[in-house]
Amino acid sequence: MEQNYRLAYAEGEVFAYPKQYRRLVGHLVYLSVTRPELSYSVHTLAQFLSAPQVLRWDAATRVLRYLKCSPGQGILLRPMPNMSLTTFCDSDWAACPLTRRSLSGYLVFLLRSPISWKTKKQPTVSRSSATAEYRSMVVSIRA
């Protein structure tokens, strides 16, 4: 999905086959277990399951085109003698244009391989980007 592309503002005609859209997003959710780079796009597409539009269907097919062009990508766990965990977290302050809630995300690595990740809207509205970042750190520590 393109950077700074806002599907919440997208207005257009309703997609004629909502079951097909839901099935595609469901498959993408399942696929995102081994492809963490899809998490944000799938998270965004899944917000519109009740009222899919043609523009959102186009965004979902764009994810499929990305998958077609990048076969063989995914999680690879390699054996290493020294085990170490590394966690990265980030937030996008007021990312949701409808509710002004921030997005929090984290990624946990075992050695150089990702083993856990999550992106979720924060439960409350943050007043600053620093507050959103602190909330993101708390979520990643609890993981």
Image (spheres, grey):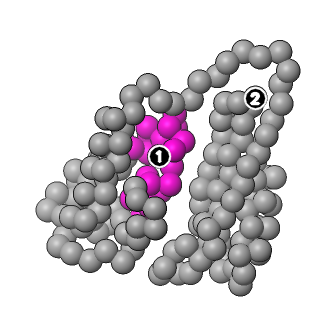
Residue 38 vs 111, above or below: the answer is below
Amino acid type at image mark 2 = Leu
Neighbour tally class for label 2: few under 14, some 14-19, many 20 plus, Cα within 10 Å: some
Residue 75 vs 36, above or below: the answer is above
Q: Is residue 85 magenta?
A: no
Give the image location of residue 90, x and y in percent. 69, 59
* Residue 111 badge: 2
Q: Are marks 1 and 2 in contact (CB under 8 Å)?
A: no
Q: Is 86 left, or right, of 24 in this rendering?
A: right
Q: Secondary structure at mark 1?
A: helix
Q: What residue is rendered at 44% in x and 25% in y?
A: 72
The residue furthest left is 16
Q: Which residue is mark 1?
A: 38
Q: What residue is rendered at 35% in x and 42% in y?
A: 66
Q: Nearer the viewer, residue 113 or 21?
A: 113
Q: What residue is rendered at 74% in x and 31% in y?
A: 110
Give the image location of residue 57, x and y in percent. 25, 58
The magenta region covers 27-47
